[in-house]
Image (tube, grey):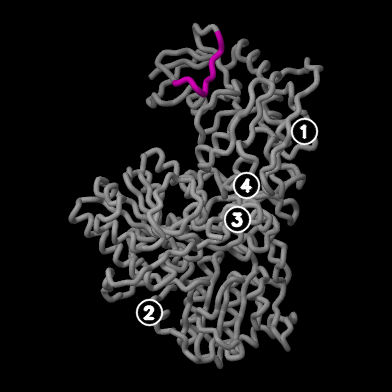
Amino acid sequence: MNFYINNISYEIDNKDLTILQVCEQNEIVIPRFCYHEKLSIAGNCRMCLVELEKSPKPIASCALPINDNIKIFTDSVLVKKAREGILEFLLINHPLDCPICDWGGECDLQDQTQVFGGDRGRFYEEKRSVSDKNCGPLIKTYMTRCIHCTRCVRYFTEVAGMPVFGTTGRGSKMEISAYIDDVFNSEISGNLIDLCPVGALTSKPSAFSGRPWDFESFKTLDPFDGLGSTIQVDLHGREIARILPVINEFVNEEWITDKCRFSFDAYKVQRLIQPYIKKENKTVPVSWKTALQLIEQHIKISEISIGLFGPLVDLETLLSLKYFFCNLGKFNLIQYEKPLFFSNLDFRVSYFFDFRKIQKKKYETCLMIGLDLKKESPVLNARFRQYCLKNETILGSIGPNSLTNFDILKLGNNFNVILDIIAGKNYFSFYLLKSKKILVLVGLTLFESKEGFMYWNELLNYKSLIKNIFNIELDLFFVSPSLSIMNAIEVGIFSFENLNKFSFLKKKKFYYLLNTNDNISLTKFGLKNKEDSFIVYQGHHGNSIALSSNVILPTPTFLEKTGHFVTLQGYFEKASSYLTPLGFAQSDLEIFKVLSKRLNLVNFLKINFELLQNYNYLFRLNSNLPYLVISKNFYKINDINFYNKKFFVLNPHIFNYWMTDPITSNSMTMALTSKYLDSLHNFEK
């Protein structure tokens, strides 16, 4: 296809592109306000007008497809005059409060007015004023600045899946408003701030914190869910001013969760900055030498060592914990802060949910089991929702009732529903049998009990059975809500057999807690009498479980140390340190290294760092490796009679999305958001 832009000939093969997209590919600047790559075309700002040969009027380049042999002019006198008139029209009612606007320096209206606008104003009448809207504790509105680009309307409808925004009124009475006066019940609503081309929607927690040229920026990853979105952290001195998304088409596109974006106020709240020990029922500060000496004494006299980790632990720390415990020479157990029964995750393809491979297939039917994707991975939920709408995928869900932005069929709250589906007694069986490709997504809830773990084994058996008998391609994936769980599966920490053998032995126990939440129940791990047990808490934020521990060891956050994470999609990501640790905090690796020296664990000191280097090199060597080799945890499980198991109810894994880890649990912004949203809209409460 040949065409002309400014009398220069161009050639392109793709006929589905618009004039605006073609100009972008050829580095020809076309200004715009309403157009966005991830949203549908609206064509209502008229800023992208270009001149078309033999056309009496300029046309909107974002809405017109490219055609053969057409001639387009982007810098003619007609186009320049049209852009100048559009900007003059948009600025008629704009308050022109750039000196106090948080969007100053990054505002599209500022930039385009400087390049394409006129040099004087001709408006001397009264400006229109619009009342601000209440969008909750996260988003601050200045609706008088709004230019009606409708990006926010399309984002909530198409990406977030909540059509709460729209336009009301006509002409000079037109406003962007919510149909119902309520706060946004969305985990990804903060992306509106990045989408808004003017300062109509800004961040409340980051208000008046500085200008963009004052910030020092660095990139890292979001550790608050299993997806591992790429983020940019802006620093004003040593203070975190804001957190923004970084475009990564393979992971998060250009969205991040509100929990990651707004929880930065917790990084200096209730931080642990020096070691503590419990003495006479009081927590007193001590030196590192005293704290480590006390730990050494109790490790030697304990009979069982139990290591528990929270949702923000990196790969190096988990490897160190594993080999530290293995070299102690005692019966030991390493588990997540909730007992998890993992097995038959021997091949990485079973627990890596690579969305790129999913997009290449057109699944007619999808079944979610014990998975609340909207809370457990909101950005992945938004991407998966758009995939299902595009391919007209029918969705069914077996699990707890919760708010969702899918058109989803609620099939029940217990796993026995799957028996009826397999036997053809449930109406969802009709959708499965007429499908050629089926996708089954399993949540962490299924692995929180022995029954769920047994059902997982049977699902794997039915996977091959359905393919052989019905000639139906069935893909089964585990969707993890936490990066630390993915890391632990990868290094082979979970052991179903150890958890069974552990039982509740009446022996002296030594507990080592790594960044666990305060809602952890040690009674599930055999704690009956604290006098017969010794508890060490190692983390960066204080909570009730840390206060009840015998020793507290301070560590840096993921922004203050370098660590690696294996994400939900199988990517090996690095989180680099750009902040110095507070107080006397030491990295987890150094703590385990010093403890190993004190305990004379020579094997640990030889294995630790060499293994980490080999592990990192393994991932850099071949990006396809995670799908070709066998994982490090391989267990033999006896056959289990699936039909004789009792009624098994699936409980929700996350009750309060906004406070799920030691960082967000200490965030005042997350606490206010939880008060506004979860208390009003959570069906489980």
Q: Counting residues from the N terminus, which is met first, the one under dot 2 or under dot 3? A: 2
Is 75 on the left or on the right of 630, as rendered? right
Is 656 on the left or on the right of 424, as rendered? right
- Could you tell me which secondary element the residue under label 1 belongs to? helix
Q: Are marks 4 and 1 in contact (CB under 8 Å)?
A: no
Cα–Cα gap, marks 3 and 1? 36 Å
Q: Quadrant of the N terminus?
A: top left
Q: Main secondary structure of the magenta part?
A: loop
Q: Amino acid at mark 3?
A: Asp
The reply to whether residue 286 is visible in this rendering is no
Q: Quadrant of the C terminus?
A: bottom right
Image depth: mark 2 or mark 1 in front: 2
Where does the image place residue 293, in percent across and percent down from the top left?
65, 87
Q: Which residue is mark 4?
A: 244
Q: Which residue is mark 2?
A: 497
Callout 1 crowding tier (Cα within 10 Å): few <14, some 14–19, many ≥20: few
The range drawn in magenta is 57-65
Q: Which residue is mark 3?
A: 678
Q: Amino acid at mark 4?
A: Leu
Cα–Cα gap, marks 4 and 1? 21 Å
Image depth: mark 3 or mark 1 in front: 3
Q: Which residue is mark 1?
A: 98
Q: Is residue 24 magenta?
A: no
Where does the image place residue 88, in percent across and percent down from the top left?
71, 19
Q: Counting residues from the N terminus, which is met first, the one under dot 3 or under dot 4? A: 4
Q: Counting residues from the N terminus, which is met first, the one under dot 3 or under dot 1? A: 1
